[in-house]
Every structure is written in C-alpha cells, then in structure tokens.
Amino acid sequence: MSEEIRQLFEKRLGRYQATIALEKTDRMPIATGSNYFAEVYSGNTKQETIYDSEKWLRAEEAFIRDFPEVDVLRDNRIWGPLYDAVGCKTYKLPGRDLPPRTQFQFVEDEYMKADEYDVLINNPLEFMMDRLLPRILGDLAEPGSIRARMALLKGGMAQVMMSQIMRNRSLYLEQKLGMPQPMTGFFLAPFDALADAMRGLRGVLLDIYRQPDKVMEACDVLVDEMVNLALATADPLKRYPIFVPTHKACFLSPKQFETFYWPSFKKTMERLIEAGYTIRAYLEGDWGHHLHHLLELPKGKVLCDIDNQGDIFKAKEVLGNHHCIAGGIPDSMFILGTPQEIRERVKLLCETVGKDGGFIINGGCNIPYDTKPENYRAMIDAIIEYGTYDSSIDPKPRVVQTEESKTPVQLKMVTPWEVKLAELGGVQGDENLIRKPWELLEIMGYTWIWQWVL
C-alpha cells in the first residue's frame, strides 16, 4: 500500500469511526451500509455481480473512481455458486430463478415445525443438522445419500472459495483504493433467527400466543449461537461494526417486542459490545415504538440505520445524543426525484439531524439499485457543502482496544481439541502445530452450519 493510499484509507476510516462514536470529525461521512447502486452503476447485471467476482470488483473500482468522496463501500454479500452447491431453497437468485437484472429474493416458509421447539432448545446443533438444513438446502434433503454427502463437500469447498473472494476484495479495496468497509461479520436478533428461516412470520406469530414460553426459551438459546456467529465472522482488528438486519420487530406491538424480541437481542448486542465491537443495526420498517430501548445499550456503540418507514427526526430526538443514526432520504427520491430535491433534503438534514454530528445521510438502510447517478452525485456534493464541521480536524482510525472481554467467548466447535487429543492418545511433537488448524477448521465448519439462518 502506498503512503498516499494508506493516508486516504485512514482518513476515511477515522471519519467513519468518529461519527459512530459521536466524536468530532471534519465532515459527515458518506457511509452507506448497503450501496446497491454501486453494483449496477457500471452496467453489470445483478447475476454478473453474484456469479462473476472479477466483474463485481471492477464495478466497485469504477464506482470509487467516479465517486471518490465515498468513505466506505459494501454492496453485494452473495456468491451464487455457494447457494447452488447445496441447493439453497431460501433464496431465489438473479439469472437462475429470476431475470438477470432482478434483485435476489428471500423465500420464507415454515421450515421448522411447531412441535420442534424442544429439539432446538435441547440441542441446537442437532436441530440444525438433522432438521433444518435438510429442509432449506435441497441437496441435503436425503441425509446420508451420496448426493447429500457430495453437497456437504461442495458446500465446504464453496465456502472457502467465497471467503477468499471476499478477503481478496476487501484487501484490494483497502490497499489499492484506500476504501474501508462499513461493516464486517453478521448475526441476527435471536427472534429473527427463529422467525426468518425457521418458523416464518406466520408461524412465529401463532407461537407467541400458543406456546409463548417456548418462543422465549428458544430465543435465549439462540443468543449463544448468534454471538458465536458474529464473533466468528467479525473483523479481528475490530475496525468495523458487526452487521445485524432486523426483520420482524416492525410487525410486533410494543408489548410483544418487549416480551419476545428485545431481551435476547439486547443480551446478544451487550456481549458483542463487551467483546470490543460496535454494531451497525438496520432498523427495518418503523421502529418508532421501539427506539427508546436502544438507550439501554452503551453510548456510541450502535449505528442505527432508519428505514423509509421510520421518522429520522424522531430517531434523532430519541437516540441522537446516545447513538449515531443514518438515513433521511427516501428511496423514492433517489429513484424518481431531481438533483435539486436531493440537495434541498440534504441541506435540511445537515441543518437539523446532522447539526452536531453523529449522523450519516443515507437512504432507507441502503442506496437503491435504481438510483439516478445525478441524484447520487447531488447528495455527495450537498454533503460536502453543508455537512462539513471543522476542516482543521484530520481524522485518524481509533486505536484498537486489545484488552480481553469481560466475558471472553470461546468460538464453538463440534469436536473440541481436547476430545480429539484424547482419541489420539497424545501427540509426539509440537501440539500447537496440530491443535491450531484443527480448531480453525472446526470453527469454520460450525460457522458454516449457522450462516444459513441469514
């Protein structure tokens, strides 16, 4: 990395980190979490983005070249061949199930039966391997068959290939273009893990009336699994927030939210924050009745993206002195509006919500695919004009906190090294040379199992 690129990377990252932490910086960062517009700006189809990693990277390079003021970039999170390798049924993909220029779609269904809560609660791993995965991964539908065993082999190899693609992309953006990521790693609120790829919305809404205690017990069990998934996929240098989309909170009344959703979600986030991480939460739908609960979390640790249905001004009123918030421009304005309308909206937001910092202008948790390029350019220019705080400040990345977590988390494995060592009857050489790769592969395998809830 050249000195010029290093300085550019550090300035961008420092600006983003300071804003999340509610600290002073030179200007408002241009820091969308999911910039779908960047995927298609160069002319790529959505199929090309998820199947051709080279075209995807070239598209991002073209986007950064034309919009160098952007501070972080993340768009696609899917590599199609991984989903094909196991016959994933929870996603319809462009070019495979949908036209090449259509966005991927999540397929919700009742993949977990109403009478299977005890299996999940008593042994989550057994539930995943024996019940859920054979239902959501079509090639595993007949456990033990040659096709199922081959699918597991292909799925593991595809995961390694995808991880390498994502790593190479991140390093290229950092070292060649000076571009940080808006987040690394992911998890779900335990209630969403249950309601998305397990019970489905209809199923879980029936369950909270018919077997509420089971729902709460399952959510408590899923806290450990979501913490593990987040830490296994997070940035080990703790530079970037961990990503969490929230899918079902907007369907719940305040009482339902307080009973079923918030307790386990709060526990999950508290443990990640204790481990030294920040979180970027997409508050999807209208969180207006739920926002105040986020004040229970430590100050400056959660970046809250406000969706189109939410009220950015109310979010600022409730959270503005405690958490950074993002949003403010309706997706429809990016798609159908004019540069002048964008400029006026940005000016309003900078003079109100963003007046004292701790704010990132964004669409509703994303920049939509169909954004007009001139509107995106108008947003950037207006942020530079109206969102500059103090040009004398030179943003620098925060020093990584190296102290151990108050509650250290040992990443999960199916077969711990101690068990394997006992089976071997001891080893004759350097134990660490054998143990470390064993544990790494175990952790990777365990993470692979749970990633399919997203």
Image: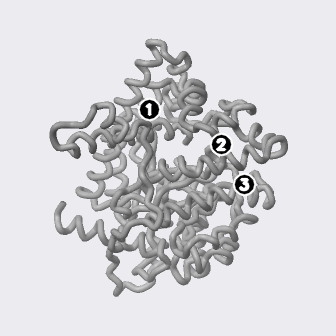
Looking at the rendered image, the disc whose residue lies closer to the viewer, 1 or 2, is: 2
Q: Position of residue 325 (x, y in %)?
A: 57, 69
The N terminus, quarter of image? bottom left
Q: Which label is found at residue 111?
A: none
Q: Position of residue 323 (x, y in %)?
A: 57, 73
Disc 3 residue type? Cys
Q: Looking at the picture, does residue 116 appear above or below residue 284? A: above
Q: Residue at x 53, y 26 (%)?
A: 137
Q: Earlier in the sequence, mark 3 or mark 1?
A: 1
Q: Can you identify the residue that label 1 sits on?
A: 80
Asked if residue 330 shows in the view, the reply is no
Category of crowding for the residue at label 3, using alpha-carbon neighbours closer than 10 angstroms: few (below 14), some (14–19), many (at least 20): some
Q: Position of residue 307 (x, y in %)?
A: 64, 59
* Occupied quadrant, residue 319: bottom right
Disc 2 residue type? Leu
Residue at mark 3 to residue at mark 1: CA–CA distance: 29 Å
Asked if residue 362 shows in the view, the reply is yes
Looking at the rendered image, the disc whose residue lies closer to the viewer, 2 or 3, is: 2
- Left or right placement of residue 317 versus residue 78 in this view: right
Residue at mark 1 to residue at mark 2: CA–CA distance: 24 Å
The C terminus, quarter of image? top right
Given residues 412 and 161, the one toward you in this image is 412
Q: Can you identify the residue that label 2 sits on?
A: 194
Given residues 361 and 249, the one toward you in this image is 249
- Left or right placement of residue 68 versus residue 377 in this view: left
Q: Earlier in the sequence, mark 1 or mark 2?
A: 1
Q: Residue at x 32, y 81 (%)?
A: 394
Q: Residue at x 44, y 56 (%)?
A: 409
| Residue with the most extreme right position | 209
Disc 1 residue type? Gly
* Occupied quadrant, residue 8: bottom left
Q: Can you identify the residue that label 3 sits on?
A: 250
